[in-house]
Structures are given as C-alpha cells and as structure tokens.
Amino acid sequence: MTHASGEASMEGRPKSRTENRLLHGLMRSPGGVVGLILVVLVASAAVFAPWIATHDPGQADFFAARTPPAWHPEGSLEHLLGTDQLGQDLFSRIVYGARVSLLVGVFGALSAVTLGVTLGLLAGWFEGWVDRIVSGFANLLLSIPYLVLVIVVATVLGRSLVNVILLFGITSSPVFIRFARGEVLRMKRLAFVEAAQALGATPVWVVPRHLLPNLAGPLATLATFEISAMIFYEAGLGFLGLSVPPEVPSWGNMLSLGRRFLTTHPWMAVFPGLAIAVTTLGINLLGDWLRDAIDPRARERG
C-alpha cells in the first residue's frame, strides 16, 4: 500500500512541475497572456452566443438595412456594429460566426491530428510497404496546390459544416503524417524503446506509453497553428461561396456579402475581417508561447 502510494506521488510530481513551469512561462510572456485573453474572449462569445447576441442573427429588418454603427451620427444603439444589406444585426452575426470558425478550426485540426498521427505512426513503425503507401498519400496531397484542392473538393462535396471540417482534416493531415513518421523513426531506435521491446513489449504497449507522450507537446504546438490557418481557410471558402450555406452566420459569408458595399458601407466587411484577424492573432500568440514553453532549446535561449 505504501509502495503504491509512493509511486503515485512520484508520478504526480513531474506533472505538477510541468504545469507550474508552463504557467510560470505564460506569466512571463506578455504575448502569451494577450493571446490567451483573446482566445478566451472569442471562445466565450461562441459558447454563450445566445446570451451575448442582442438579436436573432438570421432576422432581417429591411427598414433598418445598412444602418451604420452606433457611434456614427446616423447609427443606432439598437445595432452596435450596424446592420447589413438585409437589416441583420452585425454584432449578433459576428458573435454567432465565432461558433463556425472555432468549430472548423478545432475539429478540423483534431481530424488532421487523428488521421495524420495514426498514419505517421504506422509508417514510421512498420516502414517497408506501409511507409511507401502512407508517404505516397502524403506526397500526393502535398503535390496539389492547397487552395486548388480545397476549392475542387468543396465544390464536389457541397456546402456543409461537416464537409468543411472533413475537408480541412484530410488536406492538412500530411503535416502531421510527416512529423509523426519522422519522430517514430527516430525514437524507435532509442535505448528506452529498444529495452521495452527486448522485454517483450508489443507495439500496442510501446506506442501509447512511450511514443505518444513524447509527441504530445510538439503536436499541440502544430495543432495550434493549424487551427489558426483553418480559420483563415474557412473564411476564404466562405468568401468564395464554398463554405457553410449562406443562411448560416459565418465570418467568411459576411465578408463575401460585405465586399460589394466596401466603398459605401465599409462596416459590413471591416468588422468580420477584424474578428478573423483578432482570433487568429490570439491563437498565434498562444501558439508561440506554447512552442517556446515546450521546446527546451527555446527555454535555454530565454
């Protein structure tokens, strides 16, 4: 009993030290703090959208169409950021649009990580024909210009949030395939992995207990930057009319509709663009901190 509790305490201490180190590093990183605040604000807007939004995002009011923001002489406090050409409240649509962007970014990155790491582990561990097939798949995706591939697949699959998530997950997987493959090829020849295999450990035991924990930190950093990129990609698809259906409030759709009024009613495009910029800035700042906190060489330089 004492021995078991002692092992539990020994296992718990490194985790506590790691968490304390990450938190201490965050407090010393102004960019990381700003990024965390921005991400929390956007995530809170997405989660609590029904309580934050002042109007139904799909409710049209043609009598209030193209109303300027509240601080404009012709603006109204009823519509803080103004309205679009249909009289829909921009503030409410931006708040609800955060849901689409974060869903696409987070679940798209999770899909890419799941597919990429699974294939990368198989390729790196078994090598041979498995490695050739997986590497060929990754090279095929990388050989096609990303934007062209996304547009073609989005056109074929149609406009749907699920389709967009799956599309980004598949097309972004080569990044994680190559990373996981390279790390597994390197680590499988290290002493602790060879010792585990010499003791009779199977890949089912070695991979989750020895390889994946060492991949978790760098993968989290890569996934963070992929989330930011996917938010941009979704906005680009929405701008081209290939993302979610037009009735769904998304920042890309809002940009697409607002571009026609950029010279006469600029707020229709400016505010969705700012929402995209602020969100991706926050995620990138948080990713920079996470990279520096996980990379030992970055800590030594600091």
Image (spheres, helix red, strand yellow):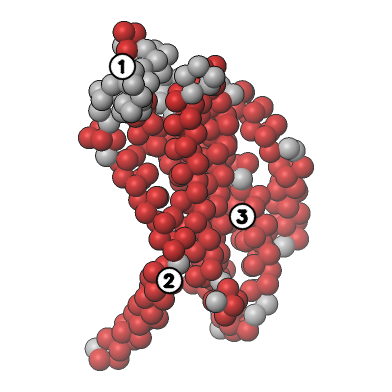
Work out which quarter of the rendered image holds the C terminus and state it.
bottom right
The disc, 2 or 3, on the residue closer to the chain's N-terminal end is 2
Q: CA distance from mark 1 to mark 2?
A: 45 Å
Q: Give, as a three-letter code, the residue at label 1.
A: Gln
How many other residues sit within 10 Å of disc 3, few (<14), some (14-19) or many (≥20)? many
Q: Give the camera-side residue of 229 and 184.
A: 229
* Mark number displayed over residue 59: 1
Residue behind mark 2: 28
The disc, 3 or 1, on the residue closer to the chain's N-terminal end is 1
Q: Residue at x 73, y 52 (%)?
A: 135
Work out which quarter of the rendered image holds the N terminus and state it.
bottom left
Q: CA distance from mark 2 to mark 3?
A: 30 Å
* Mark number displayed over residue 176: 3
Left/right placement of residue 262 relative to residue 47 reads: right
Above or below residue 241? Residue 96 is: below
How many other residues sit within 10 Å of disc 1, few (<14), some (14-19) or many (≥20)? few
Above or below residue 281? Residue 233 is: above
Assess whether mark 1 and mark 3 are in contact (beta carbons under 8 angstroms): no
Left/right placement of residue 34 relative to residue 114 reads: left
Q: Where does residue 21 sit, x and y in percent of width and height?
A: 41, 76
Q: Residue at x 36, y 24 (%)?
A: 72
* Mark number displayed over residue 90: none
Closer to the observer: label 3 or label 1?
Answer: 1
Q: Which residue is at the far bottom? A: 2
